[in-house]
């Protein structure tokens, strides 16, 4: 068992597809919450082989994309401070804020380093004691525990030059905002697999129960997504609404309770600003009082100036599933991966970037 | 962003492990999955193992997929 190739078998895909075609009767709209699922759907041409009755829409599950300009501006302002090194996941580098990006700050002399892991940021802190290293904490429940663990490690080692600018967010409050708005009618939700590895499928039970929204947690291989669609179609056709798991090899009902404890030790929930949604209470994570000395927001005093949105950019509506990328007037014209206007064109899991790469023949 | 890759745990020393990801060896942290044992497959995200993979469940999922295909063929 390699846990990858087994879940790409075209024979099994055919069987699942036949099953979906035979079972699907109603016209339905399914949302893939997670940008990673959007990539799987497009990379493997899944939209083209599903019945016409099933419409797929992309959701807000791309942490880089939902980061508000006010937060990006703060990160860029921090990068311009003397003796500061910014350590960030690569996806954040090119995202334009109100006035420029980290990449532009870097070109003008700021020390911005791309890292794969918060562990790399810890190493940079250890090796550069004369610099203040700020890690940009981006990500949902999948990533927040890793950053929490890095803060615990910094505390243990007595590292005094490691800081985190937490822009972490948690998914259920955003999904609730989406469901409450009634802006998009959804019949089923493809729940994020690696968020659920931490939260457990229990996180989606309220949506199945209170909102009557069938939920299935999916993995990221093509067979995972097809099985998830099949399970959702079955729930819908049978009039059920439950929180089920297709990705059983990596997700349980309880999730990773140890990782959640680490996360709860370091972070507490706070209001967060989501691109496309605005401020959502209890949807963000900030460092708790005990870890204030690691909190870049508390330690460094910067004025990023007023946040300004790019004229014409539809990323907010794309993230709410209201507009599909080709419907944005800037898509492919003013806005490309080489010269992006909005974050959904920058992140490797942004809907616009995915449509740009794989969706050419779906646009007509 | 929430990408996580399956990797096989080759050795463990305290809270870190050496894993094999498709032929590439890497050192990763087990701070989020302290119960991990040598030989386990884990989901690797940003240098941390965030969950252990369950082989029985993986095989069961494949069996369910297979059955759905066979059922279809027998019609």
Image (cartoon, grey):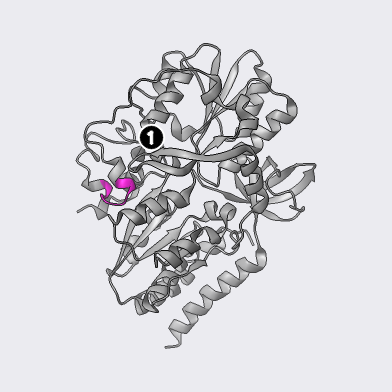
Q: Locate residue B11, reporting x and y percent.
A: 77, 47
A181 with respect to A44 (left or right): left
Tell me if mark 1 has few (under 14), some (14-19) or many (20+) residues whose alpha carbon lies within 10 angstroms of its own. many
Q: In which quarter of the image is residue A316?
A: top left
In this view, the residue in front, A12 or B36, is: B36
Which residue sits at x=74%, y=30%?
A156
Chain ID, mark 1: A
Q: In the rendered image, which quarter contains the C terminus of chain B?
A: bottom left
Q: Locate residue B36, reporting x and y percent.
A: 74, 52
A322 with respect to A14 (left or right): left
Task: Tell me which segment is drawn in magenta.
Answer: A318-325
Secondary structure of the residue carrying numbered label 1? loop
Which residue sits at x=39%, y=64%?
A211
A237 with respect to B31 (left or right): left
Which residue sits at x=44%, y=75%?
A15
- Furthest toward the right, the residue is B13
Q: In this view, does A337 lie above or below B72?
A: above
| Count of numbered labels shown in the rendering | 1
Q: In this view, does A213 lie above or below B9?
A: below
Residue A157 is a magenta residue: no
Q: Quadrant of residue A91?
A: top left
Q: Locate residue A326, reporting x and y percent.
A: 24, 47
Instruction: From the image, give the main secondary structure of the stretch colored magenta.
Output: loop
Q: Locate residue A221, reporting x and y percent.
A: 49, 58
List the residue tagged with mark 1: A68
């Amino acid at each position: 068992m390699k846990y990858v190739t087994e879940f790409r078998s075209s024979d099994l895909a055919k069987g699942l597809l036949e099953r979906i075609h035979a079972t699907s009767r109603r016209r339905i709209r399914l949302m893939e919450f997670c940008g990673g699922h959007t990539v799987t759907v497009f990379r493997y041409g899944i939209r083209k082989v599903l019945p016409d009755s099933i419409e797929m829409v992309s959701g807000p599950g791309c942490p880089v994309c939902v980061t508000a300009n006010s937060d990006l501006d703060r990160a860029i302002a921090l990068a311009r401070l003397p003796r500061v090194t910014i350590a960030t996941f690569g996806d954040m580098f090119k995202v334009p804020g109100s006035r420029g990006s980290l990449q532009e700050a870097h070109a003008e002399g700021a020390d911005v380093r791309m890292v794969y892991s918060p562990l790399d940021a810890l190493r940079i802190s250890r090796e550069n004691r004369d610099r203040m290293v700020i890690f940009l904490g981006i990500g949902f429940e999948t990533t927040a525990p890793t950053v929490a663990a890095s803060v615990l490690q910094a505390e243990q080692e007595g590292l005094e030059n490691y800081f985190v600018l937490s822009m972490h967010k948690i998914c259920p409050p955003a999904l609730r905002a989406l469901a409450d708005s009634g802006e998009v009618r959804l019949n089923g939700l493809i729940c994020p697999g690696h968020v659920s590895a931490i939260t457990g499928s229990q996180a989606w039970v309220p949506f199945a129960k209170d909102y009557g929204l069938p939920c299935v947690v999916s993995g990221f291989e093509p067979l995972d997504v097809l099985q998830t669609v099949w399970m959702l179609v079955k729930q819908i056709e049978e009039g059920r609404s439950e929180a089920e798991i297709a990705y059983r090899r990596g997700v349980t009902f309880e999730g990773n309770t140890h990782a959640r404890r680490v996360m709860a030790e370091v972070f507490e929930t706070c209001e967060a600003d989501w691109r496309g949604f605005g401020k959502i209470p209890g949807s963000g994570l900030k460092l708790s009082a005990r870890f204030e000395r690691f909190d870049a927001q508390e330690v460094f005093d910067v004025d990023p100036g007023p946040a300004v949105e790019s004229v014409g950019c539809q990323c907010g509506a794309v993230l709410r599933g209201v507009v599909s990328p080709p419907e944005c007037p800037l898509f492919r014209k003013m806005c490309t991966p080489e010269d992006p206007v909005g974050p959904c064109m920058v992140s490797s899991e942004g809907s616009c970037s995915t449509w740009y790469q794989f969706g050419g023949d779906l646009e007509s | 962003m929430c990408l996580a890759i399956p990797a096989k745990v080759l050795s463990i020393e305290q809270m870190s492990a050496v894993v094999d990801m498709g032929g590439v060896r890497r050192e990763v942290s087990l701070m989020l999955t302290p119960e991990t044992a040598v030989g386990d497959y884990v989901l690797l995200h940003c240098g941390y193992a965030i969950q252990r993979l369950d082989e029985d469940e993986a095989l069961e999922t494949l069996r369910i997929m297979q059955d759905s295909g066979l059922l279809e063929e027998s019609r």
